[in-house]
Structures are given as C-alpha cells and as structure tokens.
Amino acid sequence: MLDHTAGNSTAQTAPASPVRAGRPTREQARARHEMLLARALDHFLDKGFEATTIEAIAADVNMTKRTVYARYEDKTALFRASVRRGTERRAVSQEVIEGTRAESLDETLVNIAMLRIDLVSTPDGAKLQRLINTESYRFPDIFQTYYDIAALPTVRFLAEILESETAAGRLAIDDPLLAASVFMSMVVSGPVRFILSGNELGRTDIDRRVRFAIRLFLKGAEPR
C-alpha cells in the first residue's frame, strides 16, 4: 500500500518556486539602477562634481566600477543622468500645477510663484539648484534640462492664463509665453536667489515680496 500521508508531506514541504542564482530580474535591475542614480546624486550634491569619484559611488551602492561603467561611460555621463533623475523626482506634476488656479487672478499668480519658490525651499531642493548653478558653466545642458522639466510646464500653464486674460480684455499681452518667462524672472528669481544664498527669508517676507512684484507685473500688463 502506498503511504499517501508521506507523499502529501513531501509535496507540501517542497518549494513551489526555487530561488535560482544568476541574472537579476528586470525589477531588481531597475531598482539597482535607481539606487545608483540616487546615491550618485547624493555624492554630487555633498561634494560637487570635481571631488566626487566613481569609486566612492560604486562602493556606496555595493557595485564594482566595471558595473557602473557598463551603464555610464564616465563620471560626466553619470552626473548628467543623476541630475536629470533628481530633477524629475522633485518636479511637481501637471495636476499640482493646475491646482494653483484660484478664484482671482492675483491669488492664482501668488500660488504659481510659491510653487516655484517652494522647489528650492527644502534642503534637497536648494542643494540641487546650487549644484546646477555651480556646474552649468561646465555643463550648460543641465540648466536646460532642469528648466525643461521643472520650470517650463509651469511657464506654459501661466502663459495659457495670461492669454485667456488678454482675450477677455483684462490684460494686454501680445506674447504670453515671453510674459510668463518675465513673470518668473521678476517675481520668483529674487526670493529664490535670497534663499540659495543661505539667508533666512520667512514666509511672511516672501509673501510680501511676491505680492508686491505681482502688482507691478499686472500694472504693466493692463490694457492702455
């Protein structure tokens, strides 16, 4: 007679899907790559481009230099990729951008300005912006990458609002996209430079500066 009990016990204890050594899964490889970019950016943010080494980054993520170089031909390529990924992870979504729309134009513009200022108001956001500002003379493309990912969607949204306000006769702007860019320079850049310089700038002071600049901007955009 067959011992069915013993047979069932063997079936229950046998692993359903044995773990096999070898190549990592696609998900594991993707996670390792994300970790490489994240830790590489941490090194660049803390030490700058020159002082950061591939050796230190590889050791930090428990990789060999050969593995890192298999993905990125040199430190410059890894730097560009890590800055791009860091920018993508910190950029706000289109949904958040559109959520700045308020009942009045003034409040909408305040919300848009604060959205941009808030990007550099966190320690990590300020570090990334300082790194881009410092290294953009050597790598002009990283400034363009940051602008395209982190700023341009907001600028385009603002341009649509200014175009709509002009069509309604409440503003007189013949180039909404240029006007939106000027708005960012006029309203946002001042507080951002102050924050990046390491000076304390409280929320009340930021709000006062932003609203004052917005009044000047709107005054200049009134129909004549």
Image (cartoon, rainbow, N blue to C red):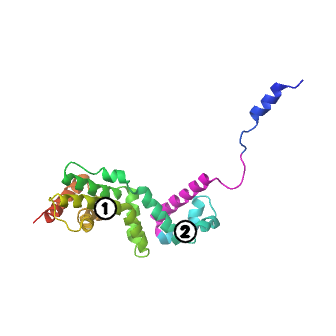
Report the front residue among 161 and 207.
161
The stretch in magenta equals 19-48
Q: Give the number of the disc on residue 156.
A: 1
Residue at x 60%, y 61% (from the top left corner): 59
User: Pointers 1 and 2 in contact (CB under 8 A)?
Assistant: no
Could you say whether the residue bearing mark 1 is in a helix, strand or loop? Answer: helix
Residue 198 visible somewhere in the drawing: no
Position of residue 87 in the picture relative to residue 159 (left or right): right
Image quadrant assignment for residue 14: top right
Report the front residue among 149 and 90.
149
Report the front residue among 177 and 30.
177
Position of residue 143 in the picture relative to residue 58 (left or right): left
Q: Give the number of the disc on residue 85.
A: none
In magenta segment, residue 171: no
Residue at the far bottom in the pictured view: 138
Q: Name the residue under label 2.
A: 53
Position of residue 88 in the picture relative to residue 22 (left or right): left
Residue at x 28%, y 63% (from the top left corner): 194
- Earlier sequence position, callout 1 versus callout 2: 2
Q: Quadrant of the N terminus?
A: top right
Residue at x 71%, y 46% (from the top left corner): 19
In front of the other: label 1 or label 2?
1
Image quadrant assignment for residue 70: bottom right
Could you say whether the residue bearing mark 2 is in a helix, strand or loop? Answer: loop
Q: Give how far apart the Cα atoms at labels 1 and 2 are.
A: 38 Å
Residue 52 screen position, x and y as percent: 51, 68
Specify the amino acid type for callout 2: Thr
Q: How crowded is mark 2: few (under 14 residues within 10 Å), some or many (20 or more)?
A: some
Q: In which quarter of the image is the C terminus?
A: bottom left
